[in-house]
Image: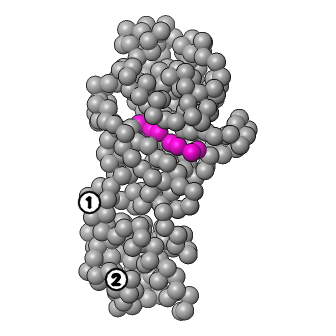
Amino acid sequence: MDLCDIDTIRAVLGRHGFRFSKSLGQNFLTDVRVPQQIAAQSGAAQAGNVVEVGPGMGCLTAELCRQAAHVVAIELDRALLPVLAETLADCTGLEVVQGDVLALDLAALCRERFGTERVVACANLPYYITTPTITALLESRAFERITVMVQKEVAQRICAQPGTAAYSAFTVYVQYHAAAEILFDVPADCFVPRPKVDSAVLQLTPLAAPTVQPQDEKLFFALVRAAFNMRRKTLVNALAPVLGSTLNKDEIAALVTSVGLDARVRGERLSLADFARLADAAAAKLGQG
Ligand code: SAM
């Protein structure tokens, strides 16, 4: 069965009385080359174990089952369970878990299902929960590779360089934990129903140790969030909500220049290494006070 063929999709879903839910981010792939390429590049064959988020009616799941011995597919929508039972009846090594990916303990799930074996994550994500899902996948520390289709702008944001409009606090968060790369773009007309936005397949390779190692990780991310909360302001002004109770504006300016940055710089121009140097200098200064 070609699970990306539009007539097959309509016939199967019609038989089960299924209706697409916009609020669950249900846009199913209609170009079989896309799930084939995602699965081939996901590392599923090498790892042998995969966790998929949101199998839908199973087009990517079927490709992953061809590549890997064990696939756990997490689907929130109960209405898709009988659909998947039909479309993936021939797949071996597959377990469909009904549940909300954000409510599950992914580290525990991987430990239970796969022990200490290698696991990758792979998904055409429901876009309304892209950021928390990527965060949960990274924080679980369970995956050696994470390959996900996301909105194109989100993929660009995650891979952005300092000083560009797309560079954000989430860019820094992801690049702190993983190497990020856009594999390929997927136009909106590859889905039913057709979404309003284009998509891209993003690959994250979690790092054994973070890209930079600030002494105080909490302070590092507090400074990053403050810098991007007021990205039009200078870094010195933007840091006041975090450092202002201990340091006055001149002291914050001195801190910024002490790590080799211009006192008028905006936070959006700082690299991860710049933020780490700033956080270490701030930690030292706050420790003195
Ligand atoms: N994998 C299919 C494909 O590529 O055609 C469907 C992808 S569709 C963009 C996203 C899927 O995620 C839907 O099946 C939707 O029901 C499911 N989903 C939505 N929210 C979810 C959640 N919180 N946890 C798990 N699955 C979810």
The amino acid type, in three-letter code, at marker 1 is Thr
> Furthest residue to the front?
46
At 52% from the left edge and 70% from the top edge, which residue is drawn?
A: 213
Is 8 positioned to the left or the right of 45 in the image?
A: left
**Magenta residues, start to end:** 143-149
Of the two numbered discs 2 and 1 in the rendering, the one whose residue sits closer to the viewer: 2
In the image, is 46 to the left or to the right of 248? right
- The image shows residue 134, relative to residue 38, as above or below, that is below
Q: Secondary structure at mark 1?
A: loop
Q: Position of residue 218 (x, y in %)?
A: 54, 70
Label placed on residue 6: none
Q: Which residue is mark 2?
A: 260
- Disc with the residue nearer the chain's start (2 vs 1): 1
Please tell me how crowded label 1 is: few (under 14), some (14-19), or many (20+) other residues with Cα within 10 Å: few
Tell me which amino acid carries mark 2. Gly
Q: Main secondary structure of the magenta part?
A: strand
Q: Nearer the viewer, residue 92 or 12?
A: 92
Camera sees residue 126: no
Q: Is residue 260 above or below residue 80?
A: below
- Secondary structure at badge 2 equals loop
